[in-house]
Amino acid sequence: MTRPTQVQYQVMWNRLISVVEEQAQALVRTAFSTSVREAGDLSAGVYDQQGQMLAQAVTGTPGHVNAMADAVAHFIRRIGVENFKEGDVYITNDPWEGTGHLHDITIVTPSFHQGHFVGFFACTAHIVDIGGRGFGADANSVYEEGLYIPIMKFIDAGRVDETLVRIIRGNVREPDQLIGDIYALATCNDIGHRRLIDMMNEFALSDLEGVADFILTNSRRATLERINALSKASATGEMVIDGFDAPVTLKVKVDIQKDRIVTDWDGTSGLDKKGINVPLVYTKAYACYALKCAIAPEIPNNAASLAPFEITAPENSIVHAVHPAPVALRHVIGHFVPDTVYAALDQLLPDLVPAEGAGCLCNFQVSLRPRTDAPAPKHARRSEVLTFNSGGSGARPGVDGMNATAFPSGVMTMPVEATEQVGPVIIWRKELRPDSGGAGRHRGGLGQYMNVGAQDGHEFDIQAMFDRVNHPARGRQGGADGAPTTIARNDGATMNGKGKQFVPHGCIVEMAFPGGAGYGPASERDMDAVRKDLAGGYITRDAAIQDYGLDAADADDILTRARLGKAY
């Protein structure tokens, strides 16, 4: 057989990226969980025989994809190549050999062509419930956080392990939803496999060794070229965030060396007693993502393009939690890893990285049930509803931050309609939060207001998963800080940024999600941009005058014209 040309290999590489994107979209279409269907909290990828990731889907989160890049090697070690069979499907939610917590199900499927094993497809999705205390930070160890599924066969040569299915169904609050998601994950891998075989037949390939070598060799060379074009230097970045009961310090040294960049997290806070700890695989995922976004953003993600970014952290630090530390909300701390890296990188590569943003997602989960303070109506029911929301992202050196947009996670904010159709929850308010973006030459992205309650006859527990209550996003290069998170009940009762909290019948939880910070001095902002922000409601009259120096008469004229529907 004639060896494919370089052009043909490039076509195959592009095809593989399309294959895994179709794999991911199949999961979006078939998943039961709204977190997958509406927010895109998933990942999908294709791997060679050695478990090296060759391509990842565009749809998905860096935490899932980059963590999952290491997961397949664990499946190979645990299952054993000699035990791979056509029709097999493997499963786990191991936080340390998967993607960081029990609420992520990872499915791996070996791919066979003409009877020969050629590689793997893998995918991950966040599921609404895995039993235990529920999705939240309240547990004291991983044993309390839910059902643990070791790396094992879910389907053995085409036969589903019904015993495993019964165990799962007997330990979770939403069994139909979870089992449906597992089948959706397995199905999307199968779709990826079918498209791969189509490609291999088209190009008369008997294996993936040639295209794998082409992808990995070129990706590594391109990434090393970017790294070696930088001056060799190091800098330290540090930030303080809320934590659970006490503030957490994240500290990193970024060291640009020949052929690699090392991030060392020595000096970071130790393990927390509650479930906000981060397995190293998840810290690695977001540290690599931060560096890759800054240095080599257009090089496709795969094992070789990630390899030059090395991450080290002291064992039993909050960013290198080991078993049995509680890790359910590992994303809360993990999503601040990029901003900490950028605090160091800004010193090495000025005018490149954004100001700090909201960081972690503004998620919450409500556990609804019939009211207990009085007789409940017959229609009242139990339900688990998880909703994904975002604050503002930080302003960048040349452009404003994005409003209510998740960075670094990249997941989408869930529509109100999708949230309310899952259970008896009511979203009373959801709108952008004026003045929440930090002032600057470029303004930080806005956070949002969100009020949540329950339908008549229900009470609920809310699992808060917020940060930035006491430590808002910090401005960069003279930009102002973003607005902090707030959370309270409409009856005046105070609430905490994290943890399960009871909300009685008739009460509403009122939340304001944080804004991103500004970049550069506000005095340098273009006044036309200030006028547009005022006319659009992104800033108030007082902010336009006090923060940006807009003339009061000019501000009043803009607001009058806006009320009349006229351009300023």
Image: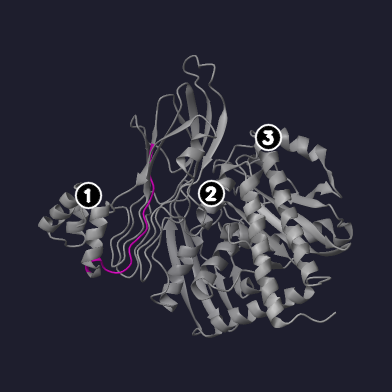
Find the distance from the CA under tag 3 to the CA under tag 1. Answer: 51 Å
Question: In the rendered image, is residue 99 in sight?
Answer: no
Crowd rating for badge 3 (residues with CA inside 10 Å; few <14, some 14–19, many 20+): some
Question: Which mark is first along the chain, 3 or 2?
Answer: 2
The percent position of residue 408, horizontal first and vertical second, equals 49, 60
Looking at the image, do the residues carrying marks 2 and 3 touch, with CB atoms under 8 Å apart? Answer: no
The percent position of residue 202, horizontal first and vertical second, equals 77, 69
Crowd rating for badge 1 (residues with CA inside 10 Å; few <14, some 14–19, many 20+): few
Instruction: Read off the residue under disc 2.
Output: 39
Work out whether residue 102 or residue 559 is closer to the camera in this orientation and state it: 559
Q: Please give the range of residues in magenta.
A: 510-523
Q: Answer left or right for 116 relative to 412.
A: right
Local SS, label 1? loop
Q: Answer left or right for 105 relative to 492.
A: right
Find the distance from the CA under tag 2 to the CA under tag 1. Answer: 34 Å
As drawn, the label of residue 109 is: none
Disc 2 residue type (three-letter): Ala
Residue at x 27%, y 53% (from the top left corner): 536
As drawn, the label of residue 175 is: 3
Question: Which mark is first along the chain, 1 or 2?
Answer: 2
Disc 3 residue type (three-letter): Pro
As drawn, the label of residue 565 is: 1
Disc 1 residue type (three-letter): Gly
